[in-house]
Amino acid sequence: MTEENQQPLLTFEGKRYDLNTLPEELKELVRGMQVADAQLRLHEDTLKVLAVGRQTMAMQLNERLQSVEALPD
C-alpha cells in the first residue's frame, strides 16, 4: 500500500483535496457535513418506515370500510 492510498481525501465539486492539509475550520465544516449527511439518511429511512406503516393502515381502513355503508353522494 502506498502513502497516497492512505491519506484521507475530500472530493468536492469535482476537485480532490488532502484533508490533512486543510485548515481546522474547513475540517470542522467537512465533519459537520458528514453528520448532516448521516442525519439525512436516518430521517429518510424513518420516512420510508412511516410511509409503509401509513400505507398498511390505509389498506386496513379500506378493507374494514367495506362492511360500512357510505353516505350518499
Image (cartoon, grey):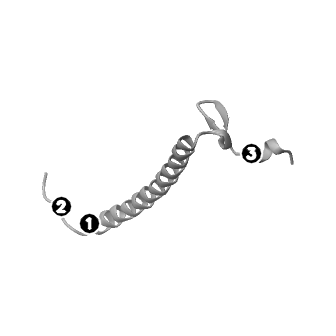
Figure disc tally:
3
Who is closer to the viewer here, 72 or 8? 8
Foreground tag (3 vs 1) = 3
Q: Residues within 10 Å of mark 2 (few under 14, many from 20)?
A: few
* Residue sitting at x 52%, y 53%: 38
Question: Identity of the amino acid at label 3?
Answer: Gln
Q: CA distance from mark 3 to mark 1?
A: 61 Å
Question: Identity of the amino acid at label 2?
Answer: Ala
Residues under numbered marks 1 and 2 in contact, where contact means CB atoms less than 8 Å apart: yes
SS at circle 2: loop
Q: In the rendering, at what x and y percent does residue 53 appear?
A: 40, 64
Q: Is residue 71 left or right of residue 41?
A: left
**Which residue of the protein is positioned furthest toward the right in this rendering?**
1
Question: Which badge, 1 or 2, comes first in the chain's sequence?
Answer: 1
Q: Residues within 10 Å of mark 1 (few under 14, many from 20)?
A: few
Report which residue position mark 1 lands on: 65
Q: CA distance from mark 3 to mark 2?
A: 67 Å
Question: Identity of the amino acid at label 1?
Answer: Leu
Report which residue position mark 2 lands on: 70
Report which residue position mark 3 lands on: 7
* Residue sitting at x 47%, y 51%: 40
